[in-house]
Amino acid sequence: MTGQTEDHEDLERLLADLERAAGAASRVAGVAPLGVRAVEDRPGQRAFLCAFEGPRFLCLSGELAPETDHDAAVEVASAALLAEHTDGVLDQEALQGLVEAASRAVVAVQDEDVADTIGEVANAALGLVDWAGDPMRALASVPALDQGVARHDAVRVAWARFVKVSEPLANDQTALSDAALDALRGLEESAGRAGVATSLTETMADALPVCRAGAREMLDSHITPLRGR
Protein backbone atom coordinates (compact mmCIF):
# COMPACT_ATOMS: atom_id res chain seq x y z
CA MET A 1 0.00 0.00 0.00
CA THR A 2 2.87 2.36 0.79
CA GLY A 3 4.30 1.88 -2.69
CA GLN A 4 0.93 2.68 -4.27
CA THR A 5 0.66 5.84 -2.16
CA GLU A 6 4.13 6.95 -3.20
CA ASP A 7 3.33 6.28 -6.87
CA HIS A 8 0.15 8.34 -6.57
CA GLU A 9 2.05 11.19 -4.92
CA ASP A 10 4.73 11.09 -7.62
CA LEU A 11 2.06 11.30 -10.32
CA GLU A 12 0.29 14.17 -8.59
CA ARG A 13 3.61 15.99 -8.26
CA LEU A 14 4.35 15.44 -11.95
CA LEU A 15 0.94 16.75 -13.01
CA ALA A 16 1.39 19.82 -10.80
CA ASP A 17 4.86 20.42 -12.28
CA LEU A 18 3.45 20.19 -15.81
CA GLU A 19 0.74 22.69 -14.97
CA ARG A 20 3.28 25.13 -13.50
CA ALA A 21 5.57 24.69 -16.50
CA ALA A 22 2.71 25.41 -18.90
CA GLY A 23 1.96 28.61 -17.00
CA ALA A 24 5.62 29.67 -17.03
CA ALA A 25 5.92 28.92 -20.75
CA SER A 26 2.80 30.98 -21.45
CA ARG A 27 4.28 33.95 -19.64
CA VAL A 28 7.53 33.71 -21.60
CA ALA A 29 5.97 33.18 -25.02
CA GLY A 30 2.82 35.23 -24.59
CA VAL A 31 0.69 32.29 -25.73
CA ALA A 32 -0.17 28.92 -24.23
CA PRO A 33 1.99 25.98 -25.35
CA LEU A 34 0.48 23.19 -27.41
CA GLY A 35 2.15 20.66 -25.15
CA VAL A 36 4.65 20.27 -22.32
CA ARG A 37 6.88 17.26 -21.65
CA ALA A 38 8.68 16.84 -18.36
CA VAL A 39 12.20 15.48 -18.93
CA GLU A 40 14.90 13.98 -16.74
CA ASP A 41 18.08 13.38 -18.69
CA ARG A 42 19.81 12.66 -15.34
CA PRO A 43 18.39 11.39 -12.02
CA GLY A 44 16.52 14.11 -10.16
CA GLN A 45 17.32 16.79 -12.73
CA ARG A 46 13.96 17.76 -14.17
CA ALA A 47 13.40 20.16 -17.04
CA PHE A 48 10.51 20.86 -19.40
CA LEU A 49 10.25 20.96 -23.17
CA CYS A 50 7.37 23.09 -24.41
CA ALA A 51 6.00 23.11 -27.97
CA PHE A 52 4.22 26.01 -29.64
CA GLU A 53 2.68 26.67 -33.03
CA GLY A 54 5.22 27.40 -35.70
CA PRO A 55 6.64 25.03 -34.63
CA ARG A 56 8.59 26.82 -31.92
CA PHE A 57 10.05 25.40 -28.75
CA LEU A 58 11.05 26.47 -25.28
CA CYS A 59 13.18 24.56 -22.81
CA LEU A 60 12.59 25.42 -19.17
CA SER A 61 14.85 24.51 -16.28
CA GLY A 62 13.58 22.82 -13.14
CA GLU A 63 13.17 26.33 -11.70
CA LEU A 64 10.88 27.12 -14.69
CA ALA A 65 13.32 29.65 -16.15
CA PRO A 66 14.14 29.59 -19.88
CA GLU A 67 17.22 27.51 -20.53
CA THR A 68 20.12 29.67 -21.72
CA ASP A 69 22.72 27.00 -22.60
CA HIS A 70 22.40 25.39 -26.01
CA ASP A 71 24.09 22.10 -25.07
CA ALA A 72 21.92 21.69 -21.97
CA ALA A 73 18.81 22.30 -24.06
CA VAL A 74 19.99 19.73 -26.62
CA GLU A 75 20.31 17.12 -23.87
CA VAL A 76 16.75 17.82 -22.73
CA ALA A 77 15.27 17.73 -26.23
CA SER A 78 17.27 14.60 -27.11
CA ALA A 79 15.99 12.82 -24.00
CA ALA A 80 12.41 13.75 -24.89
CA LEU A 81 12.80 12.44 -28.43
CA LEU A 82 14.50 9.24 -27.25
CA ALA A 83 11.67 8.56 -24.79
CA GLU A 84 9.15 9.20 -27.57
CA HIS A 85 11.02 6.82 -29.87
CA THR A 86 11.08 4.13 -27.18
CA ASP A 87 7.34 4.55 -26.64
CA GLY A 88 6.88 3.85 -30.33
CA VAL A 89 9.09 0.75 -30.27
CA LEU A 90 7.36 -0.74 -27.22
CA ASP A 91 3.92 -1.28 -28.73
CA GLN A 92 1.69 -1.94 -25.72
CA GLU A 93 -0.99 -3.59 -27.84
CA ALA A 94 1.57 -6.00 -29.34
CA LEU A 95 3.04 -6.74 -25.91
CA GLN A 96 -0.40 -7.41 -24.46
CA GLY A 97 -1.05 -9.68 -27.44
CA LEU A 98 2.09 -11.62 -26.54
CA VAL A 99 0.87 -12.06 -22.96
CA GLU A 100 -2.50 -13.34 -24.19
CA ALA A 101 -0.93 -15.68 -26.78
CA ALA A 102 1.41 -17.10 -24.14
CA SER A 103 -1.50 -17.66 -21.78
CA ARG A 104 -3.34 -19.63 -24.46
CA ALA A 105 -0.25 -21.65 -25.34
CA VAL A 106 0.38 -22.63 -21.71
CA VAL A 107 -3.01 -24.31 -21.63
CA ALA A 108 -2.68 -25.97 -25.03
CA VAL A 109 0.84 -27.42 -24.70
CA GLN A 110 1.05 -30.64 -22.71
CA ASP A 111 4.83 -30.70 -22.28
CA GLU A 112 5.45 -29.39 -18.76
CA ASP A 113 8.94 -28.00 -19.41
CA VAL A 114 7.79 -26.11 -22.49
CA ALA A 115 4.71 -24.83 -20.67
CA ASP A 116 6.93 -23.54 -17.86
CA THR A 117 9.06 -21.52 -20.28
CA ILE A 118 5.94 -20.12 -21.95
CA GLY A 119 4.77 -19.01 -18.51
CA GLU A 120 8.10 -17.24 -18.04
CA VAL A 121 7.56 -15.42 -21.34
CA ALA A 122 4.08 -14.36 -20.23
CA ASN A 123 5.28 -13.09 -16.86
CA ALA A 124 8.22 -11.18 -18.34
CA ALA A 125 6.02 -9.64 -21.05
CA LEU A 126 3.45 -8.63 -18.45
CA GLY A 127 6.20 -6.87 -16.47
CA LEU A 128 7.13 -4.90 -19.59
CA VAL A 129 3.48 -4.06 -20.27
CA ASP A 130 3.14 -2.70 -16.73
CA TRP A 131 6.25 -0.55 -17.15
CA ALA A 132 5.26 0.76 -20.58
CA GLY A 133 1.75 1.62 -19.36
CA ASP A 134 2.82 3.34 -16.14
CA PRO A 135 1.32 6.87 -16.03
CA MET A 136 4.73 8.13 -14.85
CA ARG A 137 5.99 7.39 -18.36
CA ALA A 138 4.62 10.87 -19.09
CA LEU A 139 7.97 11.88 -17.61
CA ALA A 140 10.64 11.42 -20.28
CA SER A 141 13.20 9.94 -17.91
CA VAL A 142 16.44 8.57 -19.33
CA PRO A 143 17.22 6.70 -16.07
CA ALA A 144 13.77 5.09 -16.23
CA LEU A 145 14.54 3.85 -19.74
CA ASP A 146 17.12 1.57 -18.13
CA GLN A 147 14.25 -0.14 -16.32
CA GLY A 148 12.48 -0.63 -19.63
CA VAL A 149 15.62 -2.10 -21.16
CA ALA A 150 15.99 -4.52 -18.23
CA ARG A 151 12.39 -5.68 -18.56
CA HIS A 152 12.70 -6.02 -22.32
CA ASP A 153 15.87 -8.07 -21.85
CA ALA A 154 13.96 -10.31 -19.44
CA VAL A 155 11.39 -11.01 -22.17
CA ARG A 156 14.15 -11.78 -24.66
CA VAL A 157 15.88 -14.15 -22.24
CA ALA A 158 12.60 -15.94 -21.48
CA TRP A 159 11.85 -16.21 -25.18
CA ALA A 160 15.29 -17.65 -25.95
CA ARG A 161 14.79 -20.24 -23.20
CA PHE A 162 11.40 -21.18 -24.65
CA VAL A 163 12.87 -21.57 -28.15
CA LYS A 164 15.62 -23.85 -26.84
CA VAL A 165 13.34 -26.02 -24.71
CA SER A 166 10.66 -26.30 -27.41
CA GLU A 167 13.11 -27.24 -30.17
CA PRO A 168 12.29 -30.98 -29.98
CA LEU A 169 8.60 -30.20 -30.43
CA ALA A 170 9.39 -27.94 -33.37
CA ASN A 171 11.37 -30.75 -35.00
CA ASP A 172 8.64 -33.34 -34.43
CA GLN A 173 5.30 -31.60 -34.71
CA THR A 174 3.46 -34.93 -34.96
CA ALA A 175 3.67 -35.06 -31.16
CA LEU A 176 1.50 -31.94 -30.94
CA SER A 177 -2.26 -31.62 -31.16
CA ASP A 178 -3.81 -29.25 -33.67
CA ALA A 179 -4.74 -26.92 -30.81
CA ALA A 180 -1.16 -26.87 -29.53
CA LEU A 181 0.20 -26.21 -33.02
CA ASP A 182 -2.19 -23.31 -33.51
CA ALA A 183 -1.35 -21.91 -30.08
CA LEU A 184 2.41 -22.11 -30.65
CA ARG A 185 2.06 -20.59 -34.09
CA GLY A 186 0.08 -17.73 -32.59
CA LEU A 187 2.70 -17.31 -29.88
CA GLU A 188 5.49 -17.06 -32.44
CA GLU A 189 3.57 -14.52 -34.50
CA SER A 190 2.80 -12.44 -31.41
CA ALA A 191 6.46 -12.52 -30.36
CA GLY A 192 7.42 -11.21 -33.79
CA ARG A 193 4.95 -8.33 -33.56
CA ALA A 194 6.20 -7.50 -30.06
CA GLY A 195 9.80 -7.35 -31.28
CA VAL A 196 11.27 -9.80 -28.77
CA ALA A 197 14.09 -10.71 -31.16
CA THR A 198 15.39 -7.12 -31.27
CA SER A 199 17.66 -5.64 -28.61
CA LEU A 200 16.09 -2.50 -27.17
CA THR A 201 19.55 -1.31 -26.13
CA GLU A 202 20.76 -1.48 -29.73
CA THR A 203 17.57 0.13 -31.01
CA MET A 204 18.01 3.06 -28.64
CA ALA A 205 21.71 3.39 -29.48
CA ASP A 206 20.85 3.53 -33.18
CA ALA A 207 18.16 6.14 -32.52
CA LEU A 208 20.27 8.44 -30.33
CA PRO A 209 22.16 10.24 -33.16
CA VAL A 210 18.87 10.83 -34.95
CA CYS A 211 17.33 12.17 -31.73
CA ARG A 212 20.27 14.52 -31.20
CA ALA A 213 20.02 15.81 -34.75
CA GLY A 214 16.29 16.30 -34.30
CA ALA A 215 16.88 18.12 -31.01
CA ARG A 216 19.31 20.57 -32.63
CA GLU A 217 16.83 21.21 -35.41
CA MET A 218 14.06 21.87 -32.89
CA LEU A 219 16.22 24.29 -30.96
CA ASP A 220 16.86 26.36 -34.07
CA SER A 221 13.31 27.57 -33.31
CA HIS A 222 13.89 28.14 -29.58
CA ILE A 223 11.85 31.11 -28.40
CA THR A 224 14.61 32.61 -26.25
CA PRO A 225 18.34 32.99 -27.07
CA LEU A 226 20.68 30.07 -26.34
CA ARG A 227 24.39 30.47 -25.62
CA GLY A 228 26.91 28.35 -27.50
CA ARG A 229 24.73 27.65 -30.50
Image (tube, grey):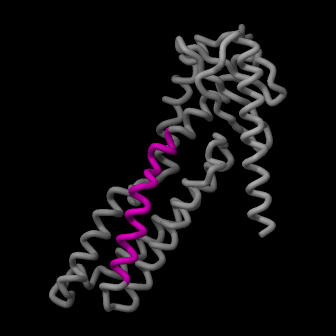
Residue situated in front as seen by the camera: 108 or 206: 108
Residue 218 place in picture, x, y as percent = 56, 18
In the rendered structure, the answer to whether residue 120 lies left or right of residue 18 reads left
Residue 129 place in picture, x, y as percent = 52, 60
In the rendered structure, the answer to whether residue 166 lies left or right of residue 42 reads left
| Residue 229 visible, this angle | no
Residue drawn at 72 percent across, 19 percent down? 25
- The secondary structure that dominates the magenta segment is helix
In the rendered structure, the answer to whether residue 126 lies left or right of residue 219 reads left
Residue situated in front as seen by the camera: 144 or 38: 38
Residue drawn at 76 percent across, 14 percent down? 27
As for residue 97 lying within the magenta part, the answer is: yes
Residue 78 place in picture, x, y as percent = 60, 30
Q: Which portion, as a residue range, is magenta?
A: 85-106
Residue drawn at 75 percent across, 23 percent down? 23
Quadrant containing the N terminus is bottom right
Q: Compared to 14, does 182 lie above or below?
A: below
As for residue 29 lying within the magenta part, the answer is: no
Q: Compared to 168, does 7 lie above or below?
A: above
